[in-house]
Image (cartoon, rainbow, N blue to C red):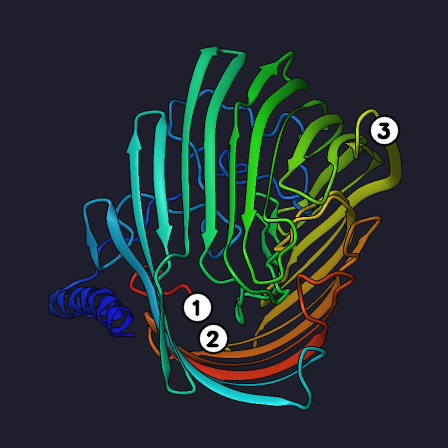
Amino acid sequence: MKYRLFQAFLVWALIFWCSTQAVRAQQDPPPPQSPDADNSQKSDTATPNPAQSPVVPGEATDASSSAPSIRAMNGAGPLPSGRVSSVQLGPIYLQSVDSSQSAIASNSTTRAGTLWRSYSLFRAAIVFDRTFKTSRFAVQYQPRLTILDGAVNADTSNLNAAWSTIFRLTPVLRMSLNNTLNYYGQQRQFDNLDLMADVTTGSLVQSQFLEGNGHFLNDRTELPILYQISPRSRVDVTPFFEYYSASGGTQPVRQSEGYGTSASYGYLLGPTKGIGFQYQVEDTYFSKFLPNTIYQSFSGSYSQRLSLTLRFSVSGGITMARTSQTNTPPVKSNLTQKTVSGSASLIKTFRDASLAFSFYRGQTPGLQITNGFADRYDAAYQRHLSLRTTFDLGAGYYREFQSATNTSGIYSSLGLGYQLTDKWSIGARYGYKNQKNGGATLATGDLHYISYGVRWEPGRRPGGY
């Protein structure tokens, strides 16, 4: 306990020292640089999200020498570069600091009755971002200090690290080397439930909302190769390796690793619309209990940007999973499972509101490592009630099938925020989660929570309410 308190004290002493330096400053720095030609497209280093809308074929063609884009940890858009925050020392800057009070009521099959708890949360977002010509390295770090029922817990391990290098071999041939690492010291997350979307890039990011114990780590390395056949058509081939690790008192499968290749052909039908055809194969190995599995997916996609404020995409195909397991030599069993797979996304911005929707059906790991398939639906709506007041609403559903656990869950979220100044804001939120688990990894039950707090964002763009 003393060590955790001392560790938390050091982290927050550094944050408040940075805050003091910011107060002494006489003026804010200029706003962050606008994303360059590469940054306006799909992030090269973002871990491929099955629910993320496909990019219009041909749209990412770029002949500039700018550095690659990296997705922001707490959003769907690109991480800004250059002089970003009023609290910045070279490539290191403070993005935000917030404090909140919450009350939780939960029911679970693992205990009798309703458990009522309250806690305080102090959190910061610190970024290290460095660009080297056509390479970029960024670490987005989010330490947390939680006081729950009088017990202090310093969670200083949540981070996202991304590195990417672009090699422009010829005017029509480009290769990248990317690595993305995500680590969560605690799987229990009560914030950022809603679907995040960026209309500029067409990117959607689904947040995790299932409740579980222990840590979760995901690392992905890939080598995308892009060949521009003509101004209208292109071929992408991406070899990749992906590793997952999860821990918990009842976690039956603690890790998995897989390698494979995805290949796609895209054709631009017009300036803002295109079609594509994709194939992916992945060989996945699990630590124990689950057999080795080879996944193959065939799909076609259509994407269109109808206007500056409306973008949508759809894809459909088939996914096959072939398992191979030897119980006792020479006994060997093979099983092939098939499912219709696909995705759909819609991003629409209005004068004072925005709407995002995402659907995905296919193979996807969550906080729980499994060899099955899943359906997921997410919707998010945000509206500016006034210049400084915002209202948001979100909901989602997740269901596994043909897996060892067949976990399912839903969430809903309602929030209200008020921008006090250009950097300071207050907000309140209500959330609800319910989950059912077919195995022993996650508990079955539901959770209600309410929270309110204050947020300081030295990295916020001036006037960006």
Residue 53 is left or right of residue 339, and the answer is left
* First along the sequence among labels 3 and 1: 3
Q: Amino acid at mark 2?
A: Leu
Q: What residue is shown at x 24% (from left), y 44% (from top)?
A: 91
Could you classify mark 1 by the number of other residues whose Cα lies within 10 Å: few (under 14), some (14-19), or many (20 or more)? Answer: some
Q: What residue is shown at x 37% (from left), y 87% (from top)?
A: 150
Checking the image for residue 387, the label placed there is 2
Q: CA distance from mark 2 to mark 3?
A: 69 Å
Q: CA distance from mark 3 to mark 1?
A: 64 Å
Q: Which residue lies under the disc numbered 3? A: 331
Quadrant location, the N terminus: bottom left
Q: Which residue lies under the disc numbered 1? A: 465
223 or 152, which is in the foreground?
A: 152
Q: How many marks?
A: 3
Query: Which of the 4 quarters of the picture holds residue 266?
Result: top right
Could you classify mark 3 by the number of other residues whose Cα lies within 10 Å: few (under 14), some (14-19), or many (20 or more)? Answer: few
Residue 90 is left or right of residue 187, and the answer is left
